[in-house]
Image (tube, coloured by chain):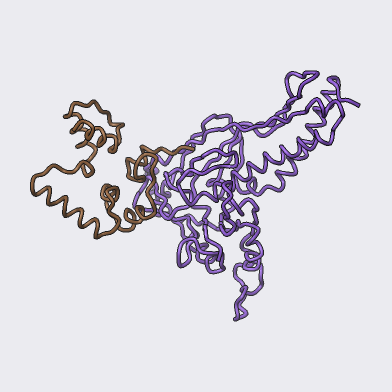
Amino acid sequence: MGCNWSKLLEKNRVKAVGVPWSSEEADALYKLKIPADFVRAGCLTREDYKEELEGVEKAKEKGEEKALKYMLKDELIEKAVSLGNTVTEEATKADLIALIESVK
Amino acid sequence: MPITTKDFPALTDDLQDIYNEAAKNSISKLVGYQVFNVSDTDRLTYDHLILHGLGGVSKVAEGSDLPNKVINEGDSVTWTQEYYGAIVPVTKKMRKFDLHNQIASIVRTITDGSFNQIDQAFADVLLNGFSASNYTDPYGESVSATGYDGNAFFMAAHTNDVDTSKTFSNLITYETVNPVPSREAIVEQRATSRKYKDPSGVSRMINLDTILCSPDYEDEFLRIINSSQISGGFENDINPLKGKLKVIPWEKLASNSAGSDTSSYWYMYDSSKIGESLRALFAERPSLDAPDQVYKNKNWDYSIDFYYAIGRGFNPYIVGSNSTKS
């Protein structure tokens, strides 16, 4: 029995390859409409999301680099390549983050 | 009189008859075979595609071309065949002393056991359908519980690849999810399922016409469904549910393969569409095979074996509640 995890992940229909959303996370995603990356970061309520978003905005204003978990896949690929890695489009965001963190 | 090698063909015919009779008896009683869409395949891996709704048709002006519909990719899911089997040993002692009853009993019990294990494997799909975690099947193996969307089979937010903001629930809901069996829960869930719309917004009615429950709740459901008046009501109102649902008690729903008490779990499904949700694909149906080689002084190893895969398909056609006993 195997579903297409990478395709599901691409559309944020699962948390990660082999990891479905919990019911609380699914509520945050589909009922509260919190973006998937923020749910992955642990935001399960509108208050959590607002707080986290403010932190991201402040960091942006200060000119700090976006946290890896909030980078788009293209941005992660660019960063991974800039660190001397060879990556393909098949790599998931989680793989790329792990790769970047391993060479930092 | 001892059974000798020259009796082997006659013994094989006899055991085949016993096997066929035991298999026929088992299959006729097993609920899983009625619920699941059981079919044959010759593929090791069966790729199943779930299209959530391609929209409907449009009005076409005279002389105009028929409009193309945007075809979404759908969700693909792969079901892989697994092999199961057992040896039915006819020992030298059985042959030497012509213990025919023992031989017949072994064939009967292994046949009946294998069909019941398949039936329990079917029931386990429903019983373990409320979590995406792996579970232990009747063969002692850890198996995946996830469906085509990476979620548990029964879930409040099943997604699709057409519009991820549109989800559907197949958890029975009345006041809360997973209610205990009640007339109100049946009525409310039937109405909800009847109003089901695909992600393109097309209403595709689901008629929940069958209830699956453990034998512990058969009586309660039969009263709710078959009473002329509303069961337990004081107003003498007629029972609008009467004759609209069939109640099927399934003893395998009383506990799962891990031994947990699941007797208060209950389900409803649309009997005309359930085959799209629950599949069983046999690459080889169970059969009794005679040994290729027959030794004078050793066991004659008959075998029962089969290949099959369980498929969790598109699942708005079945709803479930893992209620706890009240």
Q: Does residue B63 appear in the picture of this structure? A: no
Q: Count the labels in the image.
A: 0
Residue at the (39%, 49%) spot, across then down: B159
Q: Does residue A80 appear to the left or right of B92 in the view shown?
A: left
Residue at the far right: name it: B1
Residue extending farthest to the front is B93
Q: Residue furthest bottom?
A: B235
Q: Which chain is brown?
A: A
The answer to whether A44 is drawn above or below residue B85 in the figure is: below
Q: Position of residue A101 (x, y in %)?
A: 22, 35
Quadrant of the image occupied by residue B109: top right
What color is chain B drawn in?
Answer: purple
| Residue A5: percent from left, percent from top | 39, 38
Q: Is residue B191 left or right of residue A99?
A: right
The x and y percentages for residue B232 are 61, 75
**In front here: B53 or A71?**
A71
Q: Is residue B205 above or below residue B93?
A: below
* Residue B280 sits in quarter: top right
Vertical side of B171 occupied by B65: above or below: above
Inspect this view and state whether residue B246 appears.
yes
Horizontal side of B175 relative to A40 (left or right) equals right
Task: State which quarter of the image contains the N terminus of chain B.
Answer: top right
View extreme (left): residue:
A62
Q: Quadrant of the C terminus of chain B?
A: bottom right
* Residue found at x 78% / y 39%: B21
Please state the horizontal and vertical placement of residue A65, each as a whole percent of the image: 13, 42
